[in-house]
Structure formats: structure tokens, C-alpha cells
Image: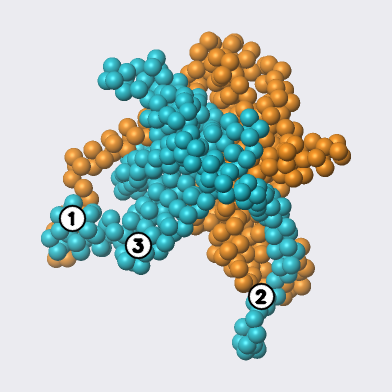
Amino acid sequence: MADPEIKSYEPVHDNISAAVTESRSARALLMTIAFVFLGIFLLLPLIIVFKEAFAKGVGAYFTSLNDRDTLSAIRLTLTVAIIAVPLNIVFGIAAAWAIAKFEFKGKAFLTTLIDLPFSVSPVISGLVYVLLFGAQAMLGPWLKSHGIEILFAVPGIVLATVFVTFPFVARELIPLMQEQGIGDEEAALSLGANGWQVFWYVTLPNIKWGLLYGVLLCNARAMGEFGAVSVVSGHIRGMTNTMPLHVEILYNEYNAVGAFAVASLLAGLALVTLILKTVLEMRYGAELAATRGH
Amino acid sequence: MTTAPAQAGWRFKQPSVIPGFGLTLGFSLVYLTLIILIPLAGLVWRSASLGWVDFWRIVTADRTLKALEISFGTALIAALVNVVFGTIVAWVLVRYKFPGRRVVDAMVDLPFALPTAVAGIALTTLYAPNGWLGSLLMPLGIKVAYTPLGIIVALVFVSLPFVVRTVEPIIEEIDKEVEEAAATLGASRFQTITRVLFPGLAPAIITGFALAFARGVGEYGSVIFIAGNLPKVTEIAPLLIVIRLEEFNYAAATAIAAVMLAISFAMLLVINLLQAWSRKRYG
């Protein structure tokens, strides 16, 4: 007797769910709008990068990449990322430890300050270092008399990159470590572990995927930064030219294949970043911070 | 916790058995001060030492005002475009099931991952008069590349993820029962969306708008390729800063930067207040 009743309930349930979604045509319209918008603004730019890079064939593509200045731009970009990203990893972990594991006055203010670089224009992020280290600037003359080059040299590029990528690791780890609390650490301490052991064997395994997630985003930005680096680099070919800056130079010289060939490497980096990020979200979503996408 | 004495005195830090507070906080503060605070303070100090008269003369120069207007105006329009389309995209991604949903969802973050210079040359090539989209728009009399419209297109691209990513989790959290209740009480689907669902999404949409707007105002890399950079027409404020720097006119660069920073921070503050208000109002 119970069976028909359950069956007769089904259509009613369908009616309810029909009442809480849009009509078929409205759904089709909204999906079309979304796909056309994303297609025009995301997919086409990505396609055109590779199309233009290979416009004159695979041979021309590799020839343009195998250029002395291009190779030195790639080397510089890697060098800058290798210095800047670890600096921000150490800071991110330290800041997250202090902010997430302890209660202290001014914590909210400190968290706000960490996000500050996100609301500063990249150009201004570069400008502040020009003002600090430039020839007309505060430390400029002193640095010059001591033979230290910061501006228009690698240290300046690293500093500008560190500035713009400053918040990435910290803002991924802070909410994650706050969520995890201090129970595990207290347990380890009560069992006789010292501070480093607690961090190394308890905290780090807990945050490793979140850390990787933050590092991924930090690295993508570090390798791709344009505005801030452009201001401090001086654009010396083969010396202080990073990959994004080299894209600009080649493009302005009407070397489209060359510009898009370097751009395709950066686009490839972006795609790899997105894929890894999605894999992390799918497999370890629960071990990432609740701030997905921020 | 229970053994903590009821102290009346001011206490900087709650007691804790976890070690490393001094080390990690100390390191964080030193690093933050050296990398962020001192350089920014340097900017403020330099612009203050300009003197009011010089500062005012630079800031109210015709070209500066126009550049600021272009930067803030185009960023505003781009953020509004993203409010409309970003909300639709977020809705489609959360509510509708279709093949490849994950891929599309992942793609939304492309502007975060793609270097701005790459986006700049790609968009310029697309919208140039002989480009894929430019050649389609040309017969309609619409010019995008090297016009203010081009700046808006670039800013829509770079700030696209913000609205989607702030609205998405809120749509996911909506309790289906609320919609069912509205439907049972006789609301049409349109009424349910505008009267019941939208107020709940409003704070997230405002946050997304604010983030998109802030990003757009400061954007440089993607814009300079497509804008054409004509003074007073398509010259954005960050570019004017770069131009002044290249002329070794540090004073002008500093003054414009200080104004941009001040306006950006003021707007963030206003938007934060607005958000707090809408959260209170719409719960």
C-alpha cells in the first residue's frame, strides 16, 4: 500500500523543484549569456596568444624563442621568482603563525595591513622603491657612493615583485590555520615536542596543501608581474628585462611572432597554474582555507 | 582558561602554551615594515614635502585630472559590467549542471593567472581593426582598440573573477527552502529572485564590485597596449605616473600617486561601510 503513495509523491516533488528554478527558456538564455561573455573575454584572448605565436609556423616559433635576449629574460624571470617566492613563504608562515595561533591586540589591523599591497596600483608599488632608492631620492646618493645597485638592477626587480606578491601566502594560510585551531599543537607540546618539532611534524603537514595553493598563486603573479617591475627595471635588454617586459619590447618592435611566442610561455604557465589549482581544490578542498577564490 | 586570573590590567597578548609568538610576530612586523610600510611612508613623506601649492598645481593640471577621470570612470564601468555578467556567470556555474562545468569554473580564474602584458597584447590583437572581433565591430561603427572602450574591455578582463568568486559561495549557501517557501506563498520566479534571493546576494555583489573597481583603477599592464595612450583621451593615471617618472619629474609622479592612493583607500573605506550596512539591513 505504501508503494503507490511514494510514487504519487514524486511528481509533486518535481513541481516544487520546478518552482525553484527558472523556466527552460530563461535557463537557456542565462547560459548563453554566460558562455558568450566568457568565450569573448576569456577563451578568445587565450586562443589568439597561441594562434599568433604559431602564425608563421613552428620553426619561426622556436627560432624566436631561441634568442639571446629572450633566453636571458626567461632566466631573469626564474631568478626573481626563486628569490621572491621563498621570502614571501617565510613571511606568510610566520605571519599566519602569529595571527592564527595567538590572541593579541591589533590583530585585525595587522591583517588589514598585510592585504594593503592588493589595493595599491602596481605602478605605485614600483614607484615607492624609485623614491626610496632613485638618484634623486632618499637613499640614492648613499647607495651610489657605496657602489650598491638596487634600482634598474635585479635587487629592485626582486623588491617590487616581493611587494606585489606579499599577501598571497599569508592570506591563504591565516584563515586555514585559524580554522584548524591549536588543539594539535597543544597535544604535541604536552607530549614533549619542542617548538620546531611541533611546527615541522604537526603544523606543516596540516597546512601543506594550503601552503602549496598560496605558493602557486604567488609564483604566477611573481613571474607575470608587469607594472611594478616595469617601473624599477630600466628595461635594459638582456640585463633587467623580465619575460613580461620582453613581451612589451618585442610587441612594440612589431615582432608579433616573438612577442606572442614569449607570451605563449607565460600563458602556458597560467594554464598549468590553473590546472594545479583546480586539482588541489578537487582533491584537498577540505584542507584548503574556506576562502576559495579570494 | 579557567585558571586565568581576572586581571584588570591591559594585556597585549592572551597567555598561550604555543611557542614562537615573539619570533613570528617580530619577523612579520620587521618584514612588513621594511617591504611595505617604509616605502609607502616614503611616498607620503615625499608628496607632503612638495608643499601644498605645488601639490595642488600638479593635481589640478588638466592632464592629471583627465587621467584620473579616465582611470576611475573606466574602472567604474568595467566593474558594473562585471556585476551584471559576473552574477549571471556565478548563477549559471552554481545552479545549472552542464558538461564541462568544472573546466569553465576553473577558467574564470584565468585573469588572475595570466600576466597582464599577455592579456594586453592578446586583447589588442583581437580588437584591432583587422582583428577577429575588431573586424566584426568595424562595420557597426564601433571602435574598441585605441579608444576608451578598449580600456574598459581590458579592465573587464582583469577584474572578471572578482564578482564571480565573491558571489559564487553565497549562491551555494542559499537554502533551497527559502525559495520553496516563496514559491509556495505564490511568488513568481522573478519575484523570488528579486525580492528574496537578491537581497541576500547584495553584500557579496558589493564586495565583488569593490574589489573589481579597486583592481581596475590601478591596472596598468593590460591597458597600455589597447588604450592608444592619447593624453586627455585614453591616458590612464598609472601611465601618467610612469611618463612623469621617465621625465624624471618625481614630484609630479609622487603627487599623482598620492592622490590615487588616497582616493582608492577612501573608496575602500566607504565600500566597507556600505557592506556593513547592507549586511545589517539584509542580514
Which residue lies under the disc numbered 2? Answer: B12
Q: Chain of mark 2?
A: B
Residue B212 visible, this angle: yes
Left or right position of B9 against A149:
left
Which residue lies under the disc numbered 1? Answer: B191
Viewer-side label of 2, 1: 2
Q: Secondary structure at mark 1?
A: helix
Residue A42: image location, x then y, percent: 42, 32
Chain B is shown in which shade? cyan
Q: Are marks 2 and 3 in contact (CB under 8 Å)?
A: no
Mark-to-mark CA distance, 2 and 3: 33 Å
What amino acid type is highlighted by mark number 2? Phe
Name above or below for residue A255 compared with residue B235. Answer: above
Mark-to-mark CA distance, 2 and 1: 51 Å
Q: Which chain is orange?
A: A
What amino acid type is highlighted by mark number 3? Ser
Left or right position of A247 against B29:
left
